[in-house]
Image (cartoon, rainbow, N blue to C red):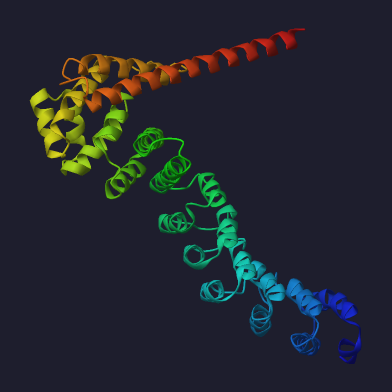
Amino acid sequence: MDWLEKAPSQARASAIPPLVRSYFQPQQSAPRREAIETALTMLLDDPSIDVRRSFAEAIAIHEAAPRHMIIALSHDLPLVSEVIFRRSPCLIDSELIEAVGSAGARVQVAVASRPWISFAVSQAIADEGDREAVLAMIANEGADLDEITFRTIAARFGEDGDVREALFARDDLPLAVRQSLIASLGAKLNLFLVTRDWMPEKRARNVVRDACDKATVLLAHDADEDDLEALVQHLRASGQLTTSLLIRSMCQGHLRFLEVALSILTGIPSPRVYALLVDGREAALRALFERAGLPERSHAAFIAALEVWRELEYDGAIGDRFRFARRMVERVLTRYQQFAQADVDDLLAMLRRLAAEAAREAARAQMRRARDAAAANADDLSQAA
């Protein structure tokens, strides 16, 4: 005991790990364990921060650590307490949440980096954690994150490029949140283009809107039913479920997206909407579109798209996604031109843009296939040689 008080701090710090190991040995006698506990408790008041940090590092991993030691070390200076908050299994959620709200960034990062953190702790970090803590939590595979937590992070840090990139890298990021980040990025890009005077405001707004709509349709393409419905609900609530977005999705053959959107907009069950889209006559379709609140001038475009979709077949071959989209939009454009009221029809202009875009995508896909085939042939020749 005297030695622990009089020895140099470096020596005291080095003596702590074996002392802690001795305390937790199963065969240790009760009197001996009590004496060691007394010595360790005295170290909680050691003037050297190196000694107290060594103590924290040695005891943090033990589930059976005396509670008073863990609590005292967790309320020490951040250099000491971060070790406890990062590793100790003895802390409960309420203690972790309190630390997130009252401690500094160093402790917040420690909590966010624990091997496992609950939904409640994750939400606390999303609500009150600083940027580094949020980044640590996003990168932590042991963090339980739900949609509310993701939404909170997106709302607080959606304009931060590093946070946005980290969120996009997570496979469990809900589609609705992913889309909201894309929309936020689009708004930022729009402001950048206008303030730099690179593009007139209206032109920049149209370019960004088209890019966001394109990204949204891609997100919806492989979504399951629950994610797709949540995405459509989000788009509706945020004012992004526009006629142009629905036409774009339909012109690329994404009938499911249109089906879910119309079901939500009309209140008609999804199977009934699907039946109308697949087999419904023009009068029934127009009634459906009217009930959904779609402008009357857009009905012809949707009907043309549905007629083409019913005729075309998706062969499932490599690259057919792009070939199908190109054939689809070109035929829709051809048919819609018969109904367009004038050359100034904005839907006609949009369809022309979509046709040009689809042609370029198909060409890029064909070029990628050609390069891949050439690379595969080169590998075969190299192996044969």
Q: Nearer the viewer, residue 85 or 132?
A: 132
Quarter-wise, where is residue 105 in the image?
Answer: bottom right
Give whichever of 211, 236 is nearer the camera: 211
Judging depth in this view, the residue of 34 and 56 nearest the camera is: 56
Can residue 338 be spotted in the picture?
Answer: yes
Residue 274 higher or lower than 156, as above or below: above
Q: Compared to 184, does 272 lie above or below? A: above
| Residue 26 visible from this viewpoint | no
Give the quarter of the image for residue 78.
Answer: bottom right
134 on left or right of 64: left
Residue 378: name its quadrant. top right
Q: Position of residue 375 (x, y in %)?
A: 64, 14
Disc tally is: 0
Q: Is residue 263 left or right of residue 112?
A: left
Q: Residue at x 22, y 23 (%)?
A: 344
Rendered-image quadrant of the C terminus? top right
- Residue 240: percent from left, percent from top: 30, 43
Q: Which residue is outermost to the bottom?
A: 2
At x 18%, y 40%, the residue is 269
Query: How far across and how far down the image is residue 317, in percent?
Result: 44, 16
- Image quadrant where one finds the N terminus: bottom right
Q: Identify the residue at horizontal 41%, vertical 20% (top origin).
A: 322
Front residue of 292/19: it is 292
Question: What x and y, as percent, mark residue 206?
Answer: 35, 34
Q: Is residue 137 above or below residue 196?
A: below
Q: Say above or below: 81 vs 278.
A: below
